[in-house]
Image: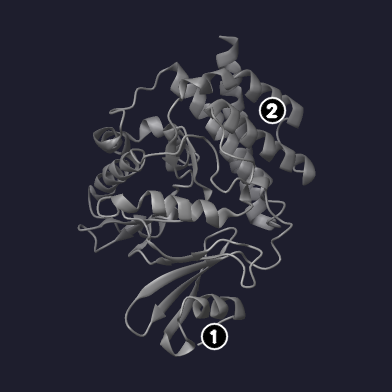
Amino acid sequence: MPIDSVLSAVLGSVGVPSELIASCEPLTGGTYNAVTRVRLTDGREWVVKTPPPGKAGAHLGYERDLLVNEVTFYDAAAGLTEETPVPRVVHSGLDAAAPGGAFVVMTACPGQPWHEVTGTMADGEEQRLRRDLGRAVGRLHTVPAPGGFGYPSAALGPLAPTWRRAFTTMTDAVLDDTLAYAVRLPRTVPGIRGLLAAASYVLDDVTRPALVHFDLWQGNVLVSGEPGARRIGGIIDGERMFWGDPAADFVSLALLGDVEEDKDLLAGYGESAPGGPVEFDGSLRLRLALYRSYLYLIMLVETVPRDTSGEDLEWTWNEVAPRLEAALGEVESTLRA
């Protein structure tokens, strides 16, 4: 059973000698941290995350100390685990300068990524699960928040007193990354920066920070059970979370699509969210266009430090760039109206 030196050091530091390790299985699908499922001889199953070697200079600005965000997310959601299943943090060491580096050890959630089982759903099961997922996300948005907005890691600075200031810092940072990595975009960086700034007034409509996952695509939602009896097994990979507008989660929940068309998810969300059913008014639609712009910028910009190439790079440009242009066009149209 192979185990690398970093993983061995992490497990040793939390009192797990090699003889207690039954198996180690690298998990794929993530784009930044190294993830390993560890089974112990006493039956416990853990997931261990560590920053991969060699990434120190190849990341976006907001990605510094991502594990701080992840621990914050799971700890904040810990009281919801029965109805909104998230991993429980077992051990963590968040000092990247420590001898073994930063790490998080968490409980493993049951199930497979949603997109891997979509083709085997029973009749009506996907609709029921979308409603269940909506309820789960609505409950996440009830979690008490600190008195500020932004990334807990402080990668872009301390939490901001307003959502407008925090989100402007976030978008400015990814646009700075665009320039640093010489990333191809469908519009110029000054043009995008100016457009987002012109629409930032709408962010003042958000006055209460919520726990926002912001990476709720189907790969980060686990589904467990047999066809016809499936349930949400876990909401994972909370490393890109921030304190902000709860509506921002709708962007990844409807990745490359339109959340207004997901009636089942919205119905479930309205049953548990603090504000009740969602009203798609002018403010919300403009804010969603801003959040789509931010997410699509990240997806395009990260292709350079990730060394994305070939078909993956072509797919990102063909699928994401037009959607970024559409989101920016929606912001532009609203400002002209």
User: Which amino acid type is shown beneath numbered disc 1?
Assistant: Pro
The residue closer to the viewer here, 91 or 205, is 91
Could you say which quadrant of the image residue 233 lies in?
bottom left
Q: Residue at x 45, y 39 (%)?
A: 146
Residue 326 in sight here: no
User: Which amino acid type is shown beneath numbered disc 2?
Assistant: Ile
- The residue that label 1 is drawn on is 2
Q: Residue at x 60, y 28 (%)?
A: 165
- The residue that label 2 is drawn on is 192
Could you say which quadrant of the image residue 328 lies in?
top right
Seen in the image, is 234 located left or right of residue 164? left
Is residue 226 depicted above or below 44 in this figure?
above
Residue 300's x, y, as percent? 65, 44
Is residue 78 depicted above or below 275 in this figure?
below
Mark 2 falls on what kind of element? helix
Residue 226 in sight here: yes
Seen in the image, is 317 located left or right of residue 136? right
Is residue 54 depicted above or below 295 in this figure?
below
Task: Classify the position of the C terminus by image quarter.
Answer: top right
Q: Earlier in the sequence, mark 1 or mark 2?
A: 1
Residue 161's x, y, as percent? 54, 29
Label drawn at residue 51: none
